[in-house]
Image: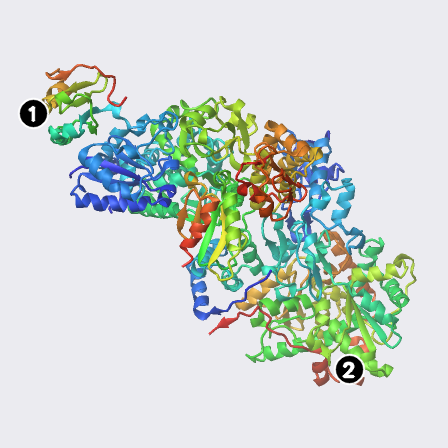
Amino acid sequence: MSETKIKLKEKDVAKIVEICGFFGNEPGELINVLHKCQGEFGYLPAEVQEVVSDNLNVALAKVYGVVTFYSFFTMKPKGKHPISICTGTACYVRGAENVMEEFEKELGIKQGETTADGKFSLSSLRCVGACGLAPVVLVGEKTYGRVAADGVKEILAEYEA
Amino acid sequence: MAKVKTLADLRKMKSELQSKIQLRENAENPESVVQIRVGMATSGIASGAKEVYHYFTEEMAKRNINGLTTQVGDMGYCYAEPTVEVLVPGKDPIVFGYVDVKKADQIIEKYIKQGELLDGIIPPNYQNINE
Amino acid sequence: MIKLTIDNKVVEVEKGTTIFHAAKKLNIEIPILCYMNLEHLDIENKPGGCRICVVEVEGRRNLAPSCSTKADDGMVVRTNTMRVINARRTVMEFILSDHPKECLTCSKSGHCDLQDMAQKLGVREIPNETTCEMSSYRLDTSPSIIRNLDKCIMCRRCETMCNEVQTVGALSAINRGFEAAVGTAFEMNLEASTCTYCGQCVAVCPTAALTEVDHTPQVIRAIADPTKTVVVQTAPAVRAALGEEFGMDAGTLVTGEMVTALRGLGFDHVFDTDFAADLTIMEEGTELLGRLNAHLAGDKDVKLPILTSCCPGWVNFFETQFPDMKDIPSTARSPQQMFGPIAKTYFANKLGIKREDMVVVSIMPCLAKKYEAQRDEFKVDGNPDVDFSISTRELAHLIKQANMDLTTLEKSEFDQPMGESTGAGVIFGATGGVIEAAARTAYEVHTGKTLEKVDLKQLRGMEGIRAGSVDFDGLEVKIGIAHGLGNARKLLNDIREGKSHFHAIEIMACPGGCIGGGGQPLHHGDSEILQKRAAALYREDAGKPIRKSHENPAIKELYETFLGEPCGELSHELLHTHYFDRKRKRDIED
Amino acid sequence: MSEYKMHMMVCGGTGCRASESDTIVEKMKKELEYRNLDEDVQVVITGCFGFCEKGPIVKMLPDNTFYTEVKPDNVTEIIDEHIIKGRKVQSLLYVDPNKGQAEPDSKHMDFYKKQIRIALRNCGFINPEVVDEYIAADGYEALGKVLADYTPEQTIDIIKQSGLRGRGGGGFPTGLKWQFAAQNEADKKYVVCNADEGDPGAFMDRSILEGDPHSVLEAMAICGYTMGSDEGIIYIRAEYPLAIERLHIAIKQAREYGLLGKNILGTGFDFDITLRYGAGAFVCGEETALIHSMEGLRGEPTVKPPFPAESGYNGKPTNVNNVETFANIPAIILKGAEWFSAIGTEKSKGTKVFALAGKINNVGLIEVPMGTTLREVIFEIGGGIKDGKKFKAVQTGGPSGGCLTEKHLDTPIDFDNLLAAGSMMGSGGMIVMDEDDCMVAMAKFYLEFTVEESCGKCAPCRIGNKRLHETLDKITEGKGTLHDLELLKNMSNVIKDTSLCGLGQTSPNPVLSMLEHFYDEFLGHVSDHKCEAGQCKSLLKYNIIEEECVGCTACARVCPVGCISGEKKEVHIIDQSICIKCGACMDKCKFNAIELI
């Protein structure tokens, strides 16, 4: 797997150690610790997982095994404006697939990727429960309802500035 | 916040709090309480319906009658405004015309509390206000 | 006891018995794939993942995995209905649809559980074979082990070995769904991971997802090279297991036949690692006594216990996971790495050839030895002390390739001088053997008396962690023994916490010691096989005229004519080493 | 204390919040204050009203006026017209598409008429962030009653007698489950609430947690009392920030009142609750997988037995129920087992919450008695099919369920009837499909989900589902054969029969049921290479209608692959072997001479 090598700063390490300590350095708290770390760093690079592994005394391979099991965890940094398209059934039957295709076309990236300028990243997510607004697109915290393929450009334009 | 120490405490607390949502409970099951519907279209308001509406909401509560006062649109009896429809559980609805504060007091005391009929009843030439 | 019916036959079993084991009692062999029972380690790998062992249980909606479903009283089980057979075959088709179809050239062909099972279930084609997407992982080659995850069938046996038995934690299930496999953190190379190359994962892998690096072609090439003198050394555990590859009973000693075969393969000098084991005892034993005496004399700088260091898997383990304790183990090299430099100096001198013209090959029950042989500190100007290390399994291949059948070969003797060994060297191959051999010599050196009862049976056995003591004429030397790295970890933690009361501890990475090494013929978790191999080594020891390392005449001569004294200057240069902190380093920006 | 004369109930569920309901609330408060009405009118942020299709919803009490699709800009109008002048704002009233008239209040809406709200009783009725409102609505009374009046055994008996079955999917009798957990002796036991709702298109658990979190806390404490546990854990999706926030508030308030913690209501019973977050794995809905996830491991299921009741979280007896199941408990305790069991069918008691979605007019959350027919749900409550299209099928049970068709419309919905019809209750998602939906593509969609969510532990689910998906893909591409249909059946049956956990054991259900009910449609794809619904792009053909083509050459010029030929002013022809079906020609043609067949 292609890994982006990053260097953690002393204070980053201290932060992770603190998070682990908050959960009593208990191996059973691994998922909670990873949630907090992802909240802190936006993603879970290898270097972060290593510190977690050391402090919780969980084998690094096991930490990675957990990170790659859950779709919520990511090892890639997200774009400045993460775009998520709900692919729940309700959104699917109301055309989410076309919306996804249109985003892929407009941004020139595939699902799970980030644009070269780091501005947008594209992902699908499971039902957000706003089925009344299907198909639903989230850009950052903002929700767009009843999105059609031809409305994609308009949404992107809001963030182009 | 003080701890709720026993079931009795909890029940006492509940009875104190219940008034807060009494209105919602009543709205949920309107047929189980006395409903007073005040016709409040423009013409009704002009003839003092708003005053009547407020009187009912306040007095019903004061006199400890579990009731529901709502405002409705034009009832179609413009000639007798302000009009008030009263629904007592188990009885047919009755519409009173030319209701003012004094009349409202009588409606509560005589009709609602004691079941006596009053003057000013408009004959039922309708099925139901909202249908 | 409970009674149940399997295929119309009634069987009575203890409560808690699985359907699989109950059927076995009736001689009904339900096919299994992922299941693995390591009774001697009290570990069962039964993820219930392959679903090959499913059976029909009356009253249940779905088929039940017999490996992990407990038998109930009155249960009615059918193992061979149309429904079961179709399900097994379809599941096998699924598994094969995601498995490379290169059996003809696969190194595991003929020893592959998956291949056997596909044949047993009669799979003849894979539906829509050409359009099936296959998972694709990159091949990872390390000095000892090759990982080809495309062949992983998620039986999780390796994961169990690496984590539950060895507590190494190099392997884990990674990813999800169709992409799931057992791999390393960040899919890094094994070399970068905490892997110790103990090879226990390779030993249990049902397919060729995990195999040893094959050095036989290089060995054949060296033998064929007329300019090279090729010297071979064979580890003690090899002779107790090699026969199994030729259909002989476990525990059959084939020392003589093996020597004949090695000569037949064209090795110029057939020597014995046991010789180097005796040498190890001289060095390690002397170091032990030195540390013991200094400690008893009150020298606070000298730490006890002293730990053995002849197992390279174990060395890798403490270098990666306990680097803070790297000054505790003995500095003596493993027998393989003592043999190499002696062969390339002492023996090469005798032959009058240059070290570059000598090739040293070792036959080992071990995969970590492959890594050890190529460590930089064991090279002189880039020339390794041991050129190639091949496993017992690879040797069997070589012998078969040379059209020899071990069962029909005459016995013959090792060459001299490095083929001379004692019983102490032989028992190196079993757990407890190294420390027993060391104690035999240390006792006599320390007390100046003759050890009358040579068999120190208090140190033998198969329990994972053992304690025993030897009376050194009034001084009670407390000895700890651990085999399997999980057990080693426990003793190391005790030492770290200051709770250890041992003077000396022997540690072997593999359960059972070298006889259960990662390069040995597959024992499929049958602990009886391990016991028989150990017994064979103790038998050979008992039959040896000399049973104490310091009495080995060839060793004596080596010290007299070449090395001087144990732990002397030359010994330090050739026979001792130092350890490295190989914990994964964190790259921190200031 | 002056009482409010009117309550403005504003939906604060995720759906409505996504369309700015929080801005509406702020503006209401500001405008009321400005008009000195803030002592007369109370603005209440509530849980979901269920009518998500037309959110944000504002309900006016006491007259039950139901305003839909309210925008912040409408706030002033509502206050001035409705509150001050007493006139309903006609433009915001819900217009029934079938009747074509505005409904004056919620009591008149078909959407609510047939509903009975037990699990959702407080959603849209109280402010979920105020424990006092919950207490006013009989909250924690059931817990108090159980602790004071009933033994654990008696309590379990009530639940058993009520006939309540697990609402998470399996339909296992809840009382029995509690009994098992109670019977196993241990020094520590756990009550776990499964709030890792993952079924795409189902959101009832989230709505309950957002709208009435205390009812779940109360029920967990009751469960803890019956089985001898002092610790509850809610395993909730990390993607539900609002529900998490409301749970945190609720737990804090309950602790402050001593309704959670030590010595609850002076009875000596201790119980407290913490949250654990899921991290995006559908398989964690399976209880053994969920427990492993709570332990910080990969959420892989293990073979049962042992059941969690025997050996669950940290190896201790554990009872896992889902949110909706718990939400029913306080009502059952207060109103009695008989009351509850009088609702529903013979073997499925009470109500069920369904999430209506897809091609239906009223997308939303409804709660109906078990035994309500599909027709009532879809055509009366759901308001029928969108845009007047024809009903084709409804998928119940999400990716684990099956589809039901026209002929099932009058089947009373309950656990057993759905199973008999080849589907299942599941968590209660109902996706309605119309004539434009291709069933092969639908089956493929569900399989895609399963393939993505399979944990990978067992071979049939890990590989088998992938093969199912590939085969379906092949069929939608027009490359399938009759033999593939046979393969689909055999693979599906084996995957069901041999998979380790519920996910794999049910994942082929959509394929099997769609094969059964729409075999002709599958056949059409493989033998005629036709997709009736027109959804499978590869099977579509662009065709130039001879009679309409004027030979303007516009299509030929726009075609990116140059597959259209023809002389000027003559009929053009598309070479199907080259056409990439981009549709550019059809867009370009001014004469509607290009059709899709």
Q: Is residue B102 above or below residue D193?
A: above
Front-most of residues D103 and C510: D103
User: Do callouts 2 and 1 point to residues on the same chain?
Assistant: no
Chain at tag 1: B
- Image coordinates for residue C495, horizontal then vertical, percent: 56, 68
Front-most of residues C527 and C510: C510
Quadrant containing the N terminus of chain D is top left
Q: Residue at x 63, y 28 (%)?
A: D520
- Label 2 and label 1: CA atoms lie apart by 128 Å
Q: How many marks?
A: 2
Front-most of residues B131 and C459: B131
**C226 to the left or right of D296:** right
Q: Which residue is mark 2?
A: C559
- The reply to whether discs 2 and 1 touch (Cβ–Cβ < 8 Å) is no
Q: Residue at x 76, y 59 (%)?
A: C520
Q: Residue furthest left?
A: B102
Q: Residue furthest front?
A: D569
Which amino acid type is shown beneath numbered disc 1?
A: Lys
> Which picture quadrant has residue C264?
bottom right
Color encoding of the figure? rainbow
**D295 to the left or right of C167:** left
Chain at tag 2: C
- Image coordinates for residue B2, horizontal then vertical, percent: 24, 46
Q: Residue at x 53, y 62 (%)?
A: A46
Which amino acid type is shown beneath numbered disc 2?
A: Tyr
Q: Which mark is residue B102?
A: 1
Q: Nearer the viewer, mark 2 or mark 1?
A: 1
- Image coordinates for residue A149, horizontal then vertical, percent: 48, 45
> Which picture quadrant has residue D125?
top left
Q: Is residue D123 above or below residue C34?
A: above
Quadrant containing the C terminus of chain D is top right
